[in-house]
Image (cartoon, rainbow, N blue to C red):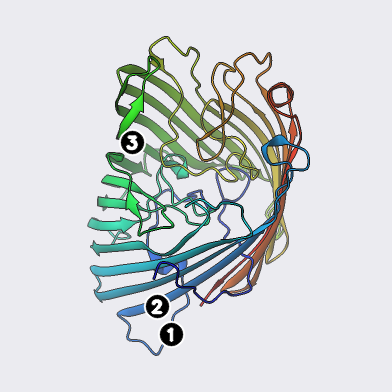
Amino acid sequence: MRRLALPTFVFFCHTFQPAGSALAAEDADTTTQPSNTVAEQSPAESSAWPAWLKFGVLERNRMEAPFGVGFKKGADQLYDLNRVRLDVTIKPESWLQFVVQGQDTRAFAYQNPAGSMQDPVDLRQAYVQVGDGERSGYMARVGRQEMTYAGGWLITPSDWGNTGRTLDGAVVSYKQSGLKVDVLTASAMLPDPTRFDRHRPGDRMSGAYGWLDKLVPKASIEPFLFYRTQLNVVSESSRHGESDSFNGGVRMVGRLPGRFDYSTLIVSQWGSYAGDGISGLAGAHAIGWTINSSAWKPRISAEYDHASGDHGSKDGHHETFDQCYGGFHSLLGIADRLGWRNSRNRRVGVDFMPLRKLKLVTDFRDLSLATVKDAMYDASGAKSVFNSKATSAHVGLELDSYAVYQLTKTANIGGGVGHLFPGAYLIQSTKGGSYTFPYLMVTKTF
């Protein structure tokens, strides 16, 4: 069953959401409150079925052709990523629903695909929800599900990835006018191509997230506190143990007179990392201006994102920021060469709609490390380059340009390219080649 092949449709997909950066990322939450229902992902439904029963199919296929993998000249790839999601929603009462979603992901012509690229025939979501999360009162959702918090910076479905991310857990919400609070506990799933997915043992986040949308006009203030546990981590003195970390902070999203919009996020981390003290800090701050109210909707924006790195390998302090369950494609550049750990990201960009169904985006980024004493981490949070003797922290300059066109109500096509020009740090630490990431995608719902 695990290797059962599903039909492959010829579509290259892109699902578009406006992001806290210039526009859009599948990873980003752009609303002040998260949305979790499978029905929203697969809006197409058949009138032949009773009102309490809904089926959905989402097909996505993306071709990628990165050049200069590992910052090496001539290290080029070409592969195709295919994803099919099938979901069933049973809603016998307005206050009760059951959701099940299966997923099949394949990586064609990709060398040694990991679970994040290929995970055939698996259970992606399976939860029961009591209560209506859009209305005042209580709501509870228990089971395997999507979650989005802090604009996708701390917890997100990370939907750009071929397999995406879901969590086993429970959320209890209370909502009234001007206030919403989520209390949750969850553990992220580990994609496994050889068996049905399970969550990572001992890795769990619990906490509370709130939305206050009447304290400041046209703004949402979002305070939060999360507690994360991890097993089998290693301290700077090579001591094995557990990590117990707190993630506290606040996010604010709003609009200002004159067609300005803004978002700001601050996260502080503290606790114990196998006996080492945790001291991490990160932030994401953006402002945008819609130039006029024409049909083109021209908008310019600027952003600064930062995350702490470790300044000493033997000082007993763990300062590398933990990006938790975040997703950063487009938030930190579509090339995905720099994650939200030991990083500095400065961005300016423009987006507009020359046609009613076409949106274009261009971003320019200046990327650097917080400190060369720590490694460079990619968008997944994994170490990609380390050179403690480098004399410069400048990673490079990145130019991103991408577009999406709404073909029909249930299909869109998108594509783009991100190019990273190597800075002094990469020149000193690698072969010094540039990195280019072009892609072409289309999404279709049935």
Give the SS element for disc 3.
strand
Tell me where residue 381 appears, x and y as whole percent. Answer: 50, 36
Count of numbered tags: 3
Q: Which residue is drawn at 38% across and 55% down?
A: 146
Q: Which numbered marker is on residue 46?
A: 1
Q: Distance between the residues labelled 1 and 3?
A: 40 Å
Give yes or no for contact between labels 2 and 1 (Cβ–Cβ under 8 Å): yes
Q: Nearer the viewer, mark 3 or mark 2?
A: 2
Residue 296 spot, x, y in % from top left: 72, 57
Q: Is residue 162 left or right of residue 36?
A: right
Q: Nearer the viewer, mark 2 or mark 1?
A: 2
**Structural distance between the alpha carbons of marks 3 and 2:** 35 Å
- In the rendered view, does 163 fall on the left or right side of 304? left
Q: Mark 3 points at which residue?
A: 224
Instruction: Specify which label sits upstream in the sequence, 2 or 1.
Output: 1
Q: Nearer the viewer, mark 1 or mark 3?
A: 1
C-beta proximity under 8 Å, tags 3 and 2: no
The amino acid pointed to by label 3 is Phe
Above or below residue 91? Residue 47 is below
